[in-house]
Amino acid sequence: MHPDIPAQEQVRKWFRSHLLNREVELQELYELPQGELDLLMAETAEIRSDTENRSRSHGRWCTAGYVLELAKIIDRRRSDNSVHH
């Protein structure tokens, strides 16, 4: 178990990424290379910005939002850590 992953995120939740051509579990976000994290943020942001997507596939739209927000947090934390090291 990764020490940075809160207990509630241990529940298996995944997002099917077309850009990465695979399913990504929430826990994997902490370990993704920065390039893949960037692609995932771009893909999930695009899904969230498409209002038709919300009504067509509400579950995917919600999961994309959760993945996007967590990816932003991880990205910010990485940026902060690289400034301090």
Image: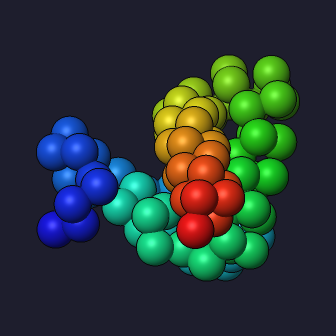
Indicate the quadrant where residue 60 lies. Answer: top right
Which residue is at a point 76% across and 40% down the rendered structure image?
Answer: 45
Q: In this view, does 22 lie above or below 14?
A: below
Q: Is residue 84 above or below residue 48?
A: below
* Quadrant position of the C terminus in the picture: bottom right
Q: Residue 59 appears at what percent x and percent y?
A: 50, 34
Q: In this view, does 61 lie above or below 2?
A: above
Q: Residue 26 appears at what percent x and percent y?
A: 40, 56
- Residue in front for this viewpoint, 77 or 84: 84
Query: Is residue 78 visible in the rendered structure shown here?
Result: no
Q: Residue 56 appears at what percent x and percent y?
A: 68, 30
Which residue is at a point 61% across and 78% down the rendered structure image?
Answer: 33
- Residue in front for this viewpoint, 40 or 4: 4
Indicate the quadrant where residue 27 lies. Answer: bottom left
Query: Is residue 56 visible in the rendered structure shown here?
Result: yes
* Quadrant position of the N terminus in the picture: bottom left
Which residue is at a point 21% across and 53% down the rendered structure image?
Answer: 10
Which residue is at a point 20% across and 40% down the rendered structure image?
Answer: 8
Q: Residue 77 appears at what percent x and percent y?
A: 54, 50
- Residue in front for this viewpoint, 52 or 40: 40
- Residue in front for this viewpoint, 71 or 15: 71
- In the picture, measured across the screen, residue 14 lies left or right of residue 55, that is left
- Residue found at the very far front of the displayed protein: 84
